Every structure is written in structure tokens, then in C-alpha cells.
Image: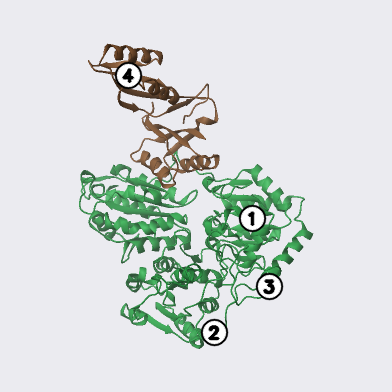
Chain colours: A green, B brown
Amino acid sequence: MELSGAEILVRSLKDEGVEFLFGYPGGSVLHIYDALYRQDDVKHILVRHEQAATHAADGYARATGKPGVVLVTSGPGVTNAVTGIATAHMDSIPMVVITGQVPSAVIGSDAFQEVDAVGITRPCVKHNFLVKDVTKLAETIKKAFYVATTGRPGPVVIDVPKDMTDPTIKIPYHYPDKVTMRSYQPTIKGHSGQIKRAVDLLLTAKKPMIYSGGGVVLGNASEELRTFVRHLGYPITQTLMGLGSYPASDPQSLGMLGMHGTYEANMAMHDCDVLIAIGARFDDRVTGKIAEFCPDAKIIHIDIDPSSISKTITVDIPIVGEVSGVLQEMNHLLVTGKKEPKKKALAEWWKTINAWRATNCMNYDRSSEHIKPQRAIEIVHEITGGDAYITSDVGQHQMWAAQYYGFEKPNRWINSGGLGTMGFGLPAAMGVQLAYPEATVACVTGEGSIQMCIQELSTCLQYGLPIKIIALNNRYLGMVRQWQEFFYENRYSSSYMESLPDFVKLAESYGHVGIRIEDPKDLQAELERGFAMKDRLVFFDIVTDQTENVYPMIRAGKAHNEMHLSPYGGELPQDPQRELS
Amino acid sequence: MRHIISILIENEAGALSRVAGLFSARAYNIESLTVAPTEDPTLSRMTIVTEGTDRIVEQIIKQLNKLIDVVKLLDLSEGPHIEREMMLIKVKAATMAQREDVKRLSDIFRGNIIDVTPTTFTIELTGSGQKIDSFIEALAEHKIIETVRSGVSGIGRGEKSLQV
């Protein structure tokens, strides 16, 4: 079979099993778009901005575990995509981004819509390729998928000069079944000796703590994690990226940890004597002050990326390997071994933890005359039975969604954790909804974030995506306002949003349904009414309390036991280090 | 501590910028970097001299290993090794006294005078970085017109080697 470069590219995607290609056409990729037009296997989703193409592919990848695929043109197509590529890179999301490039002969001549795509994306990709020989195109695509999806996943860019897709040059097509690269051989299997040492240490713990992250979701290891946690009977806390990999409603779950983590999770981190970190990377939002991080703990760390080990926190027992395999081996040792967890010490530890829990740190003013954003999220949980796919943007609403939705399953919570990209939520929801047309997909956002990719309402109409947009509208860039309240003596510099659009009319003008909710008494009924419209996109403009803050909060650079707590929580068990704001 | 890291890297366009970019993006020190193809034209050999605490050097090595194009890597400072640097230095040598003294110093340091004009000598000198520094110091009383240093190349002693 002889094909042109453009046809090879499209055919390779098909042979790779690609369902959707999120993209936007332009001069350098027109040969590819022509090849796409002449086939039905790979469905192209036309977004309204290249950033949205990358976020949609990213959302698709996070929900399905399969790589998201993007096609953009050269120059501004690439630069617009960079934010989404960096977002995926920070959260280790498998993605393949094909960027058009000006013809090889004019590269470097400042040609129209030319940008050094390989250079610009280098710091925010796992790897990138420039195709210089059309006979290597299929192999390069195979390599890109291989690199993107193995080891610690990440985005891979393939820059394709226009002449590589020339329809007049036909060459034989062969898509390789697999590729090997001498320079890329990720460690998959954890070291058995280290695993045994880790299990021995875990069983000596009197105050153990399990801290799991996004690696469990990416590594598809939730089942193994549940078995592990339940067998040991130890408390578990999860990072923002790990939510859902262990059920939030389980009594052993202490909720999220870190800057906006629960009182019990952070206190338990501070006081524990053995910590096992599973697919988590000790991000600064999690650790707080490094010098006072888990001061009395021996630390075990499982991660597929050797460079994550002892990067910020020095660990005692590192295990490099895939989380699922390592946990399977640990579970086997626990079941077959003679030693048991220290029951008496563990009972004492749980007593301490339950006293922390009794502070009810996540309580809020439930009798307010304003709509409380936390309540809105709780109602969304009730309406969707806790089984919806929730995407979010970045800010206070993101934290409330993380804290109050209560994720029971992995791959349901889709947010930009590492890069913190506003504008992520709506396009990410499109990717999820395309992957799972029957599922309930909600985008929790704010009136600030939603305006960063609002043009995608048009894409949603074109493809009939019945996403539910929960805009918690407090007329402020809420998280910025909160920091200004706490740390800048209420000087609300540029955090107030004037001249907001009428979101209901805006949604309607894009052909969707808009519902504005202002009274707490209407909240439940209106959300139910909107969610009942299964085949329509509904934009809920929810007017929330302007003064509400996200609690608990650890200031940047403070330790886990130095939290700002909500004034609506219960009494603290002992010697309060409570800093009321 | 100073470390000499030896790298075998795919001889691909852009491979050098991946390494250089890593150092600048993560704010690592780079004292010198040399790179050239090996006997296998698909591979380049790179020698990087860097400085940092054990923790930072450990991260540098892990981050370098993570680059997809890096095939193999060795911290030469961990074992016995040889390091060499080459310098070309142009010195003013116009009077008989100057010419004699520069020639004498060059001989002492086992340099080779590789270019001669009525007013200058150009000397080629190979050795450790320290030896090269010493030679420059020894020439203090002379007018140095130009120096070109290659940066450090290194290799492990004995049987130990870095190969695919």
C-alpha cells in the first residue's frame, strides 16, 4: 500500500486505535486535513481555540486512561497549544500533539506562521520529534505513543513540516507493532528487596500513614490500593490528584491533605511514625514547610520516576516501579507473611485521629442567607449519586469540588493540579463527554475561570455535548481575594470582576440552557431541574457568598499542624494551635 | 562538590539543547560542557562539569537520565578517572627575551608551539584544568592575546568504561 505522508499520518492514528483527534486547521496542516476528510475512522473534533484542543484531549486521557491526541497548525497554533501541553506535562497525562510546521526548505527563514515548535515545547513535554524524513513518519508516531504512555506518562509533540505530508509523494506504508528505543527503557518492576524492607517497616509502625497520589490513578492501581489499605487498617490521605483512587466515604479515608486538606489528614501526617507515599511527588502544596514535614516519620516512597525520589523530601526506602505491581507484591507479602500490624498501637492512633476528626473541620455556615458554594457541590453529589465525572477550573471552586464532592472512583476527578490552569474545565469536560456520551459530566468553575475558554460553548453545541456547567459566581477571583484577605490586609487588588456578562443569555446565545440561581432555597430544585435535561448543556450561574473562604488552609511555607480553620468547625481536642482568621 | 558527568547521547539534532535546557530550566550550575560524535556515528559523547551538593548532583543525574535521548550516563567523579582539557593560547612574543621566556615556559609545561609570527607564539597545551590554570599564571608577565579552552573531557581509569 502506497500512501502520502498525510495519509500515513491519519492511517497511523487509526492503527494506533485513536478515536478522537482534537484540532484546528491551518496552512501547514491542510494536507493532513484533506486526508482526514477522506476517511471516517478517526473523528476530528473542531474546537474554537487550540488551548481547548489540548485540554479536551487531556480530559479524554484522564477519564479513559488512553492517550489524548491533538492536531494544530504551525506558529500560533503551536503557541496556543503550549498551555495545554504544559498542563498535561505537570500532571503526567499521556498525550500526542501533532503540530504542523512550515516546509523543511524554509525552516529558519522566519516564514509565515513559523515558530520553533520543538524549541518552544521542549521544557514542557516528555519528548518531542521533528520529522525530517517521510519514510520515518509512521515509526515516529509509534515512538511518540510509546513514550507518551509508558513509564511516567506525559505529552509528546511531533512537529511535521508541510512537505512531509505532500499528497503527490507516495511511499509504502507500514505501521510497526512495537518499537524499542535503546535510550528509553523505563523501570517497570519494583525491587523485591526494597519491597520486602518496606513491608517490614510498615508493620513496625505505631502511627502509620498512607499518602497516595495521582500515580495510583494513572497507574490504574486503585484495586490494589484498596486491598492494601484495608488489609493494614491504616489511615489514608490523598492528594488533589489522587482523589477517587480510594473511596472518600470509606472510614479509613481522612480526605485530602496539604494546603486545603482536612485537619485530621494534616495532623496525622505531622504526627505519624511511618509514612508510605504511593504515586505521589511531595508537591509543595502537599508538604508545606519542608523542614517540618512528617518530622518523626520513616518514609517509604513508591514512584515510577526515579527523579521523583528524594527530590524535595529525602526518603528512607525508595521503590522505583509501577505502583500496581509494587502494591500487588506488597499485598502478597502481607497476606502470606507471619507478622501483623501492631493492633494495640493502631487502636490508640485511630483514637487520636478520631478526636481530630471530631473537629468537623469541613463544616460551614449552613444557615446563611447566601448560597454557600460548598452546599452547591454537596447537592451536585446527591443528584449525581457521586458517580459523575467532575472537571474543574482553578481557584476556590476547584478546592470546594475536591473537598465536598466525595469521589468514590478513580478517573472521575479531572483538574489541573500541577500547573493550575484556568480555562481547563470546560474543554476537559468536552473530552470526557465525547469518551462517555452517556455519563453525567459536570464542570465546576467560577465566573473568572469559565471566561478563559468560554468560546468552547460553541464546540459543545456542534457536537451535542450535554455538559453541566456549575459556575460558582462570587464576582471575585475568589482564591486571589482570599489570599488578599489573609495576607494583604483586604487590599483586593484586581480581584473584583466588574462587567460580567449575563451568563444565562450568553449560554442561550450559544444554543444552550442557562439557569441563574440566587436564593439558597432554590438551589436544590434548580440544580435538579437542570441535571434532568440529559441532552442539553446547562449553564448554572450560581450566585454565591462573596466572602466565603476555603478552609482549612495552611499558609505557603507553614507546617502541617499550623492551619487556619473555619470558624464553623467544632472544638479542637487538645492544646489548640488554631489560628482563626 | 565538583562532578564530571559523562553521557552517551543519541546523535540527534536538538540533543545538545535538551541537556543545556535542562541545566538552565532547573537552575543547575554548568562549568563546562563538551560534545562530539563517537566511533559510532549514531552516538555523541558529552562531558559535563558541574558543581553542587550531593542532593543536587543526584537530581542532575536523575534528570539527565530521564531525557529520552540519553542512552547512558556515568558520574566519573565516583571512581578513579582521567580528565584532560586542551588550550590554545596566543601570547605576545616580539622581543628575543619574550620569545625565549615563552618558549622556556611552554617547554616546562610540555606545550607545543604550533604557530609563530614575528610578534606572537600560539601554544597548544593539554592537561588537567589545574595545569592549564597554572600555565596561564606562569605567563603572568607576558601579554596574553587570546585563550581558547576546550572544556574538560574525561574517561574512567582501567577496565571501567561507558559504552552501549
Q: Eyeballing the image, is A119 above or below B104? A: below
Q: CA distance from mark 1 to mark 2?
A: 37 Å
Q: State the image coordinates of residue A27 (x, y, percent, origin top left).
A: 22, 56
Left or right of A62? Residue B125 is: left
Question: Which residue type does callout 3 highlight?
Answer: Ala
Q: Are marks 4 and 1 on the same chain?
A: no
Identify the mark nearer the N-term, 3 or 2.
Answer: 3
Give the alpha-carbon distance from disc 4 to disc 1, as whole Å. 59 Å
- Name the residue: 68% across, 72% down: A358
Chain of residue at mark 2: A
Task: Check whether the beta carbons of the residues at disc 4 and disc 1 lie within 8 A of each other.
Answer: no
- Label 2 CA crowd tier, 10 Å (few <14, some 14–19, many 20+): few
Which residue in the protein does label 3 denote?
A358
In the rendered view of the protein, which quadrant contains the C terminus of chain A? bottom right
Q: Which numbered disc, 3 or 1, marks the residue that appears first in the sequence?
A: 1
Q: Amino acid at mark 2?
A: Ser
Q: Residue at x 31, y 56 (%)?
A: A79
| Residue A52 appears anywhere in the view | yes
Q: Chain of mark 3?
A: A
Element on which disc 4 rests:
strand
Quadrant assignment, res A409: bottom right
Q: Residues within 10 Å of mark 3 (few under 14, many from 20)?
A: some
What is the distance, in whole Å, between disc 2 and disc 4 at their CAs? 84 Å
Which sits in the foreground, B70 or B96?
B96
Dots 2, 4 in contact, CB < 8 A: no
- What is the x, y in percent for residue A260? 55, 66
Q: Residues within 10 Å of mark 4 (few under 14, many from 20)?
A: many
Residue identified by numbered label 1: A294
On the image, which quarter does residue A211 sit in? bottom right
Q: The disc numbered 4 marks a residue on which chain?
A: B
Residue at label 4?
B123
